[in-house]
Image (tube, rainbow, N blue to C red):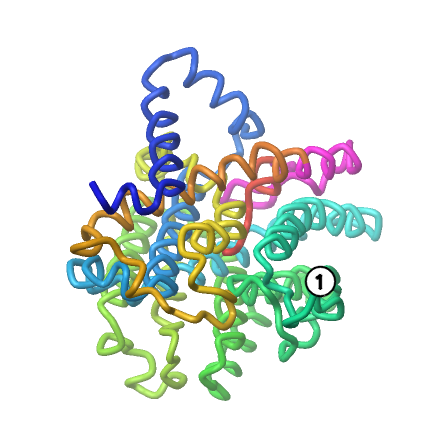
């Protein structure tokens, strides 16, 4: 009982999230949630993609809950050794971004469409990102010892790190978001230059990155974006059911094997790139790419993955991604600066420490609750504003999978996060 009382915010937030899940058993509530969160999907919606995004987000949230709170949840890591490999969720996000954002840009027919693509991306990403800045300010993350470090604050406001990776930033999870933003900016001109040769371009670019590989996580991001583009292109041509089941099984096997740790990084062991300290392996990217290539054509697995609570996780994943670090800081203020944690944790632990189930059963559901709040009040209104500004835009819709790109799907553009 002491452990629950020691973190009242986490406990109350988790209870609120569980009550929300329990309320879904009532048809009126379930119907309201579907109308509110999933109303944008139509017949071209890619079933299962939200769940994959949600699982990737859970992986990241679990990992940060463990790493930033050490030694509070070492008992969880002892029970689940793979917890130390959860940073791999970032790679899954980036392959998803490559797959979905490529299809969004593919619908652009002229400069007006490209302009609307940038408007939608801005209102999809920046409002929640700005809330992260506000939270960082409230949690004194921009302190210079005697006040606010305004150049530091303005650097975050204008996303300077997108173009100057060495620049510091307050929210440590945003390192991959800046890479995503650069990918959003670079993709339209690259697609204009290579047009119908994007599969060839992506394959050659990936080979170059593997050949000139280095341990930088930024390099890992771009490998994953390229794999997502390749998967999107291959998926449009992949029509045989048996082949798609084989691709999915192979991809899932590769992902599960990769999560067993560095000893199973087969690509670096045979000389395909170097060993990445954060375990951003080539095998993870290829495995995820195979799954995404096949999934749009497999109705059965898609429906299984589209189970509402799991789909809900994917829908709110970007908001959770941005705010979960501040939830950790609110529960463990002794961490201090998120980018320079004090880690004076041991003296604050309750007698006997925390149960192995406290991190996944209380901390993470608490993160999800506040992510849902952020989605409802910040992210979703921002998405709607972007859509209204681009009203009537054909390119605001996405494709479902096989064959040439059909008219756009707002759900994919609205829900695709990439981060993360």
For the question of whether residue 297 can be seen, the reply is: no
Q: What stretch is highlighted in magenta?
A: 382-409
* Relative depth, front residue between 293 and 364: 364
| Residue 399 magenta-highlighted | yes
Q: Is 343 rendered above or below residue 128? A: below
Image-based side of 91 in relation to 284, left or right: right
Please tell me which residue is depicted at 53% across the width and 21% down the height of the picture.
Answer: 35
- Identify the residue shown where x is 30% and y is 35%: 304
Can residue 151 be seen in this snapshot? Answer: yes
- Residue furthest right as drawn: 112
Residue nearer the viewer, 129 or 93: 129
Q: Name the residue under label 1.
A: 185
Q: Where is residue 50 in the image (x, y as percent from the top left)?
A: 44, 41
Residue 132 within the magenta-colored segment of the rendering: no
| 317 vs 11, nearest the viewer | 11
The x, y position of residue 368, in whole percent, is 42, 41
Above or below, comparing residue 235 to residue 13 in the picture: below
Vertical arrangement, residue 58 with respect to residue 78, above or below: above
Q: Where is residue 102 in the image (x, y as percent from the top left)?
A: 60, 55
């Amino acid at each position: 009982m002491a452990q629950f009382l020691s973190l009242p915010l986490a406990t109350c937030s988790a209870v609120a999230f569980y009550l929300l899940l329990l309320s879904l058993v009532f048809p009126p509530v379930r119907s309201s949630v579907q109308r509110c969160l999933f109303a944008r999907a139509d017949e071209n919606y890619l079933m299962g993609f939200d769940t994959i995004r949600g699982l990737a987000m859970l992986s990241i949230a679990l990992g940060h809950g463990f790493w930033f709170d050490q030694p509070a949840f070492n008992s969880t890591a002892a029970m689940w050794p793979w917890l130390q490999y959860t940073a791999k969720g970032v790679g899954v996000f980036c392959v998803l971004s490559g797959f979905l954002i490529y299809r969004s840009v593919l619908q652009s027919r002229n400069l007006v469409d490209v302009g609307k693509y940038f408007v939608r991306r801005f209102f999809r990403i920046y409002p929640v990102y700005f809330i992260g800045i506000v939270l960082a300010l409230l949690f004194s993350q921009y302190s210079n010892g005697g006040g606010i470090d305004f150049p530091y604050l303005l650097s975050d406001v204008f996303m300077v790190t997108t173009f100057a990776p060495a620049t510091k930033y307050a929210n440590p999870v945003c390192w991959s978001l800046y890479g995503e933003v650069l990918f959003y900016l670079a993709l339209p001109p690259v697609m204009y230059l290579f047009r119908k040769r994007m599969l060839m371009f992506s394959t050659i670019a990936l080979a170059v990155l593997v050949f000139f590989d280095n341990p930088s996580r930024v390099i890992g991001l771009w490998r994953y974006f390229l794999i997502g583009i390749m998967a999107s292109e291959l998926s449009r041509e992949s029509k045989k059911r048996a082949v798609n089941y084989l691709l999915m099984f192979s991809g899932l096997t590769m992902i599960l094997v990769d999560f067993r740790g560095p000893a199973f990084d087969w690509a670096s062991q045979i000389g395909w790139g170097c060993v990445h300290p954060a375990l951003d392996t080539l095998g993870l990217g290829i495995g995820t790419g195979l799954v995404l290539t096949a999934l749009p054509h497999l109705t059965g697995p898609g429906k299984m993955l589209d189970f509402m609570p799991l789909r809900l996780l994917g829908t709110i994943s970007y908001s959770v991604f941005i705010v979960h670090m501040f939830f950790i800081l609110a529960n463990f203020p002794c961490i201090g600066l998120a980018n320079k944690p004090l880690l004076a944790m041991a003296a604050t632990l309750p007698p006997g420490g925390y149960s192995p189930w406290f991190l996944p059963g209380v901390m993470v559901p608490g993160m999800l609750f506040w992510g849902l709040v952020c989605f409802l009040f910040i992210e979703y209104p921002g998405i709607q504003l972007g859509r209204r500004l681009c009203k009537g835009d054909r390119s605001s819709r996405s494709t479902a999978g096989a064959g040439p790109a059909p008219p756009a799907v707002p759900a994919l553009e609205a829900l695709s996060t990439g981060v993360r």
